[in-house]
Amino acid sequence: MKQLLVIFLTALILVSCQNKETAVNVEPGSSTLIIGKTDSLRSEILDETRNIWVYVPDEATGAIFGQTTYPVLYLLDGPSHFHAMTGMLKNLGDNNIVPRMVVVGIPNTDRTRDLTPTHVDVMFGDSAFVVTSGGGANFMDFVEKELIPYVESNYPVTGYRTFVGHSFGGLATVYSMLSRPHLFSNYVAIDPSLWWDDRLMVHWADSLFTDQNLKGKALYIGVANTMDEGMEIDRVLRDTARSSNHIRSILTFINHAETENNSELNIGWKYYSDDDHGSVPLITEYDALRFLFPWYRLRGLDEFFQEDTGKTVEELFFKLNNHYTIVSEHFGYQVLPPESNVNSLGYNFMTRNKSDMARAMFELNIKNYPGSANVYDSMGDYFLAQSDTLEAIDNFTKALELGDSPITREKLDQLVAGEG
């Protein structure tokens, strides 16, 4: 009977592990998958109501990963890029490659007005298109003084912000970096329209890269292939045709940034030869996320799982503490090892019979996340694997006091019945 109980409980542990690794954001009582929500705020600066699209890492995932607040990414032309960006962030975030982030997509009301920094009278012979141009400063006032405070008051975000824009949105992103570098930590300019107003941003950037201190900030630029057929990128800077002005402006800006950058801004860019202006956002967004957060991913743990390596619990703690100290320095606030990461380490060590390291990981989670039912459930599984029934019962009981779980309750009932 005792052997059957152990087999049954082992199966429950495996099921429990799977449940802890899976989080699906499904609206209760329906079959609808929830990606985000729409919200709105009244802007006195712009004298209009502005809609926003908001994605928050789902509540179940947040609870499992021990997070209550997240960095935030502001996304211009929100409806056009919202699904791609949130999908990538969920995938990369759930795999601990980049941080999980709240996304605030900003739909347009008057795109040319909001995303251009100066007024011009004629563009490509069409004066009607630019009649409202030049509202960029007003729009950035709205972002700084109304939108960001609203988001920080109503959503679980930190002050670590990333700003992403494409085309005119890329122009606005660069303009924000040049005019208000205190607002964001990261900037992503996707094939930006830096030709605007006789390359105003290109000329303005010279003083920024010489005089401004942008240490700790990063800019990634994606460059689409918008050249005429037969033109090569190594020749386009010497070209004078109007048709190449768009890409020449971007490459000139990049050249200045790389050769005259005394600001300590971390700059990355890539030319996408197989993508045009319309197709380049998706691949740029992915590459930008990987570029902006190379310090976030925890590497080098494989050696702790190998047999007879002599690695100690103390060395494992040093590895974790050192990594998350670096992460915290980048964010500007303390970041604890995520509950899910440490939980997975604990179970992996259990399967490799490294009980001292497994216990250390579960104890670390209890220390960092004492209000989580999950950490006590995991510790209960650990003691169950060690055949310490009393300690297992104690931890399963604590887990149920913090949150009801059918799986935890079933394990506890079986143990109590077996003891009886």
Image (spheres, rainbow, N blue to C red):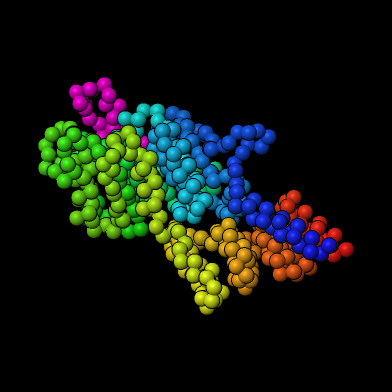
| Above-or-below relation of 99 to 55 | below
Q: Residue at x 71, y 69 (%)?
A: 386
Q: Magenta stretch containing residue 64, yes or no? A: no
Q: Position of residue 379 (x, y in %)?
A: 68, 64
Based on the displayed image, in which of its 4 quarters is residue 368 positioned?
bottom right
Q: Position of residue 80 (x, y in %)?
A: 41, 33
Q: In this view, does 240 lie to the left or right of 264?
A: left
Question: What segment is highlighted magenta in the picture?
Answer: 118-140
Screen quadrant of the N terminus: bottom right
Screen quadrant of the C terminus: bottom right
Q: Residue at x 66, y 37 (%)?
A: 28
Q: Residue at x 67, y 54 (%)?
A: 16
The chief SS type of the magenta part is loop
Query: In the orientation shown, which residue stands out farthest toward the bottom?
Result: 310
Q: Is residue 125 left or right of residue 68?
A: left
Q: How many numbered marks are there?
A: 0
Q: Which residue is drawn at 58% across and 36% down?
A: 33
Near-viewer residue (19 or 70): 19
The answer to whether residue 148 of the structure is visible from this angle is no
Q: In this view, does 189 lie to the left or right of 18?
A: left
| Above-or-below relation of 184 to 412 | above
Near-viewer residue (246 or 156): 246
Q: Magenta stretch containing residue 122, yes or no? A: yes
| Above-or-below relation of 407 to 107 | below
